[in-house]
Amino acid sequence: MNRAVRRQRVPAALLVPAGLGLVFLVLPLVGLLVRAPWTTLPRRLGEPGVLAALRLSLETATAATLLCVALGVPLAWLLARVEFPGRRLVRALVTVPLVLPPVVGGVALLLVFGRRGLLGSWLDDTFGVTLPFTTAGVVLAEAFVAMPFLVIAVEGALRAADPRYEEAAATLGAGRWATFTRVTLPLVAPGVAAGAVLCWARALGEFGATITFAGNYPGRTQTMPLAVYLALETDPQAAIVLSLILLVVSVAILAGLRDRWVGAT
C-alpha cells in the first residue's frame, strides 16, 4: 500500500508548473465562454454569413483532409519502409510546414500556383485553371499546412507496426499492392484515422496561408477563421460567436474521435 501511495504522489516542483500550464491553456477558453453573448446567440447563429462561413469551412477542411490522406499515406509509407538517399532531408522537408509561418506558406503557394507561378502559369495557359482566390485555393492552402500532421502520425504507426505480418503475406505470394492494402493499411488504420482527425482540425483552423493565397471573399474563400478576423474589427460580439462555433466543433471532433483512435496507436 505504501508503494502505491508513493507512486501517486506528485512532486510540487512538477505539480505547480503543470497546474499553471493547464490554467494558461484553459483560461482563454473559459474567457470565451464567459464573454459569449448567450442571449443573442440563436439569432447570430442563424445569420447567412455565419452559416456560409461554417459550411465552407467544413467542406474545405474535409476536402483538404481527403487530399492529405490520398497523398500523405503513401508518403508516410515511403519514409517508414523504404531506405533511399536523402530520406532524412525528405522527412525534414515534409515537416517544414509545421514550423513555417502560415503567411510564408501562402506566399510560397502563390509563387508556385499563382497565375505567374512556376506551375500556375502552365495550368492557366493549358487548362484554364486558376487556383488563387478560389475555393480550390482554400483547399490547397489547408492541405499544405495540415498534411504534416497526417504524415507524422501514419509514419509513427507504420514504424510501430510489426513488419512480420507483411513479411508473412509476401512469403504467401501476396504482391506489394495486395500486402499494402490488405495487411499494412488495416494494421495502421488507427494511426491513419488519428492523423486524419488532427489534419482535419488543423485545416479547419487555418488562417494565414488561406488569406494570403485564397483571399477573403464571402461565400467563396471566407472560412470561419477569416470571418472571425473580419468580424473582430467591426463586430466583436459576432467574432466571439464565430470563435465559439469553432471551439465547439473542434472539441467535439477531438473528444469524440481523437481519444479513441490516438489511444489505439
Image: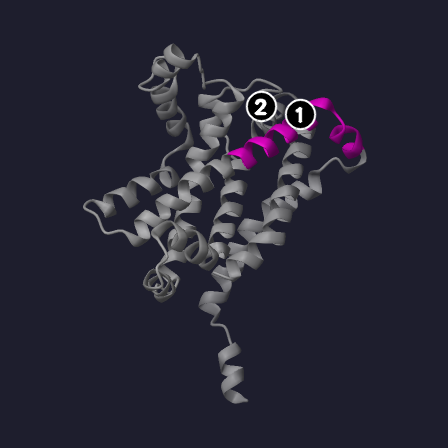
Residue segment shown in magenta: 40-63
Residue 81 magenta-highlighted: no
Q: Secondary structure at mark 1?
A: helix
What amino acid is at disc 1?
Ala
What x and y, as percent, mark residue 258? Answer: 56, 53
Q: Which residue is mark 2?
A: 222
What amino acid is at disc 2?
Gln
What x and y, as percent, mark residue 105? Answer: 38, 29
> Could you classify mark 1 by the number of other residues whose Cα lies within 10 Å: few (under 14), some (14-19), or many (20 or more)?
some
Q: 190 left or right of 166?
A: right
Looking at the image, which residue sits at the far bottom? 1
What x and y, as percent, mark residue 231? Answer: 63, 24
Q: Compare marks 1 and 2 and give the one earlier in the sequence.
A: 1
Q: 188 left or right of 44?
A: left
Q: Is residue 51 above or below residue 173?
A: above
Residue name at image x 37 percent, y 37 percent: 97
Q: Quadrant of residue 221?
A: top right
Q: Is residue 155 above or below residue 126?
A: below
Q: Secondary structure at mark 2?
A: loop
The chief SS type of the magenta part is: helix
| Residue nearer the viewer, 141 or 25 | 141
Residue 95's label in the rendered image is none
| Residue nearer the viewer, 50 or 234 | 50
* Colour scheme of the picture: one colour
What x and y, as percent, mark residue 123? Answer: 38, 16
Q: Which residue is mark 1?
A: 52
Q: 145 left or right of 216?
A: left
Q: Quadrant of residue 148?
A: top left
Q: 218 left or right of 69?
A: right
Q: Is residue 10 above or below residue 262?
A: below
Q: Are marks 1 and 2 in contact (CB under 8 Å)?
A: yes
User: Does the image show residue 146?
Assistant: no
